[in-house]
Image: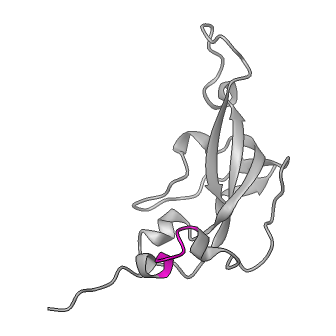
Amino acid sequence: MSKSVNQPVAIAKGVGDPQCYKGKAGGPPKFKIGDRLRIRDLPDIFYNQTPGYTRGKVGTVTALAYESPAPEDEAWGHIDVVEWFYVLDFLRKDLWGDDPLDANENDTVQAEIPERWLEPT
């Protein structure tokens, strides 16, 4: 009986994931730190890693995270499309509204979002 090798594991062996995708996004990042971006409300089938509560909301890029296939592609074995991931900060109140018991109206939530989910405001 032959063993099948998990392709992403084979690619990352000895290098690490997402380090094994470094330089494979096909160009420079589209957005930069400080950009205000809206999370697109894309259809999803089966799986994605973009939090539903961020869809349609605006956040600020605070870091360029890494290059990698998007989780929704990787779940289906499609690792040939590599894109940039960004860390965005969202004001908690922009995601869930005002909370009269909230001790700090400037609390933030961070999320890593693939480039395909982002659009300029």
Front one among 107 and 52: 107
Front one among 15 and 101: 15
Choose top left, top right, bottom left or bottom right for residue 97.
top right
Tell me the residue at 42%/68% (across/down). Answer: 75
Of all residues, the one furthest to the bottom in this rendering is 2
Image quarter (top left, top right, bottom left or bottom right) of the N terminus: bottom left
Q: Is residue 27 visible?
A: yes
Q: Is residue 77 visible?
A: no
Image coordinates for residue 76, horizontal then vertical, percent:
41, 73
Give the color scheme: rainbow, by chain, secondary structure or one colour. one colour
Of all residues, the one furthest to the left in this rendering is 1
Choose top left, top right, bottom left or bottom right for residue 103.
top right
Tell me the residue at 72%/17% (across/down). Answer: 105
Decide: is 52 above or below 99.
below
Of all residues, the one furthest to the top in this rendering is 101
Tell me the residue at 69%/29% (across/down). Answer: 94
Decide: is 98 above or below 72.
above
Q: Is residue 17 magenta?
A: yes
Image coordinates for residue 50, horizontal then vertical, percent:
55, 51
Does the magenta stretch mainly form a helix, a strand or a loop?
loop
Image coordinates for residue 87, horizontal then vertical, percent:
69, 49
The residue stretch that appears in magenta: 11-18
Image coordinates for residue 47, horizontal then vertical, percent:
43, 59
How many marks the image carries: the answer is 0
Tell me the residue at 42%/76% (across/down). Answer: 9
Decide: is 42 above or below 7.
above
Tell me if 17 is positioned left or right of 23 in this view: left
Of all residues, the one furthest to the front in this rendering is 14
Q: Is residue 7 magenta?
A: no
Front one among 52 and 85: 85
